[in-house]
Amino acid sequence: MKVGTDGVLLGAWADLPSSGTVLDVGCGCGLIALMCAQRLSSASCDFRIIGVDVDEGSIQDAGENFAASPWRSCLQAVQADFLSYAATLPAGSVDMVLSNPPYFSEDLLSPHARRNLSRHAESLPFGELLCRVQRLLKAGGTLAMVLPPRAYAQIESLLKETAPNLHLQRLTRVYFKEGKACGRLLAQWRKLSGGASPDGQADFLPAQAEAPCETSLALQDPQGNHTSAYCALVRPFYPWL
């Protein structure tokens, strides 16, 4: 699978935990997991990143990429359907979930099976994803995703019913070129209090969410040149910028 702009944006933009367990759901070749490992290692964090994907070829690619990286001891590639895999993990055991999820639920399927798995929401329904993520996250844990506007609206419409403890913390509207319509949204939700934590202790976080931080990011100026804001975000991963 190709390395895409969506994954690069999410891997560079997401606020990462200072330590703990991070899940990259639908990891593909492992791009986002590797970017997070690079960022966390530079901060001398104690972390573990698990890339999960149902596609055998993608997990093979991710495993090879993880093994060839300087952070191989902190990275793990797991071939599994996330919904089934999540059921094997204890509640409240994950610090962060990142996902560049399938979202073309209303579009025609491609004749290529691997592309269908990576691009269509039938393979990972949003409502079930949110429900599993809320269960897995610790109090204060976060979910970060990159989504087209229509898919983001679907997520927001499902949150109250499927994951009421997830509250929007950050939102960045991404414009592929200045003056054009918003093409993607980078969103990060935080799990707030909702009763007792898995260890039986009361959650320490407030029940009321603060207003989210909303920003915008243009990738190119009207002339087609990379903007300074985009370059500053991704320069650690693109040395030629």
Image: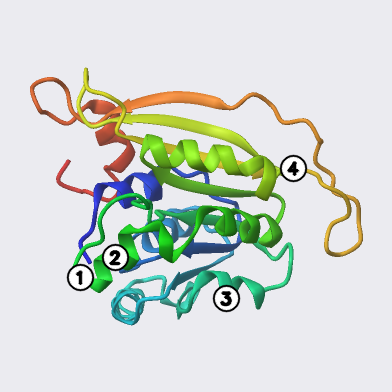
> Label 2 belongs to which residue?
116
Q: Is residue 184 left or right of residue 79?
A: left
The residue pinned by badge 1 equals: 112
Residue 38 shows up from this direction: no
Mark 4: amino acid: Leu
Query: In the image shown, does 192 or 182 lie closer to the viewer?
Result: 182
The nearer-to-camera label among 3 and 4 is 3
Q: Secondary structure at mark 4?
A: loop
**Marking on residue 45:** none
Spatial distance from mark 2 to mark 4, Cα to Cα?
A: 34 Å
Please tell me the numbered disc located at residue 85: 3
Q: Which amino acid, mark 2?
A: Asn
Q: Quadrant of the N terminus?
A: bottom left
Q: Earlier in the sequence, mark 3 or mark 4?
A: 3
Mark 3 lies on a secondary structure that is helix
Residues at circles 3 and 2 in contact by the CB criterion of under 8 Å: no
Residue 86 seen in render: yes
For the residues bearing labels 1 and 4, Cβ distance under 8 angstroms: no
Q: Are marks 2 and 1 in contact (CB under 8 Å)?
A: yes
- Residue depicted at x 43% and y 57%: 36
User: What x and y, as percent, mark residue 180?
Assistant: 22, 22
**Within 10 Å of the Cα at label 2, are there few (<14), some (14-19), or many (20+) other Cα atoms?**
some
Give the mark nearer the N terminus: 1 vs 4. Answer: 1
Query: Which secondary structure, mark 1?
Result: loop
Q: Residues within 10 Å of mark 4 (few under 14, many from 20)?
A: many
Q: Nearer the viewer, mark 3 or mark 2?
A: 2
Give the residue number, with chain letter if any, for mark 4.
192
